[in-house]
Amino acid sequence: MLEQIYYFSLFLNFLSIVVFFVFAIKKSREAFKIGTFLITSGTFLLILFLTLNGIKLGYHPATNTFFTYNFLAMLIYILYFIFEFWFKIRLLSVFILPVGFFFNVVAAFQSKLTPDVIKSISPVFLGIHTGFLLLGEAMFLVSFGASLMYLIQNRNLKKKSFGGWYSRLPSLQDLEYIAGIGILGGFPMLTAGLLVGFYWAANLWNNSAWFFDPKIIWSLVVWMLYAYVFYCKISEKLKGKRFINLVVLGFIFVILSFFITIFIPSIHSSSNYFGVK
């Protein structure tokens, strides 16, 4: 039953993205309404799937790779609803939702820690650690989507191309503001998630050089980059396109962190490192 809920959610989310692209091309209000209904239904089923699994397992579901990526997709969809309702930017759908769907799909191909392994490694700490990190990354995605729209709108202005998406995109100032909100909200979440993770790792892997793990090193690189972006935002050291380019670079580093986890051996991907033989 749970598996059917998950795959039906995937199907609805995929259809919604197709319909939203039709909306972006045809400027059809009906297409936007249909797409909104589909993504709302798909997100509800995804939330139901994760909730039922959490009840079944007895802890936060985002404690293995499959559930973590789906939890990230859920957060992306929820943030889309919040920002679309807040700023009334309908084209956010084609810049944000496909990334959420991407994490929905790749989740099925990731290695998983079994429930027995998770129970032995303190699911409370793991749930808090992943929860903060995923919320931060979802906020960064919103910043990234707004930044892409900024670059498109900036290009339209430079070329004096006032047709197409120009009239349907917000001003550069509004898009920079949205990108800034994602940074201001996401960086504290990223910091909290890493601090919890480091505390937990120091107790769990106190006899190993866990701080040399590729995933952890790259996480610190990402944190330092976003710390600089955060500083630039609150100090207004960088504005306009220079700030936007930095936001885009930051999210590219976030995406690279997922590939590091997949292709490079890490203590995060082996149950032997979690005290389980």
Image (spheres, rainbow, N blue to C red):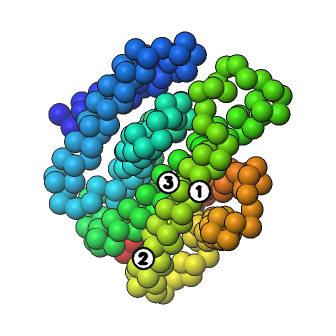
Cα separation, mark 3 vs mark 1, equals 10 Å
Residue picked out by circle 1:
180
The image's mark for residue 139 is 3
Number of marks:
3
Dot in front, 3 or 1:
1
Residue 242 location (% of width, % of height): 77, 54
> Residue 196 — which label?
2
Q: Which structural element holds mark 1?
A: helix
Q: Is residue 275 left or right of residue 92?
A: left
Is residue 48 found left or right of 136 in the rendered image?
A: left
Q: Is residue 34 visible?
A: yes
Q: Is residue 255 visible?
A: no
First in residue order: circle 3 vs circle 2: 3
Residue at 27% in and 60% down: 60
Q: Gap in Å between the C-alphas at discs 3 and 2?
A: 19 Å
Q: Earlier in the sequence, mark 3 or mark 1?
A: 3
- Counting other residues with Cα less than 10 Å from the Cα at mark 2, is it few (<14), some (14-19), or many (20 or more)? some
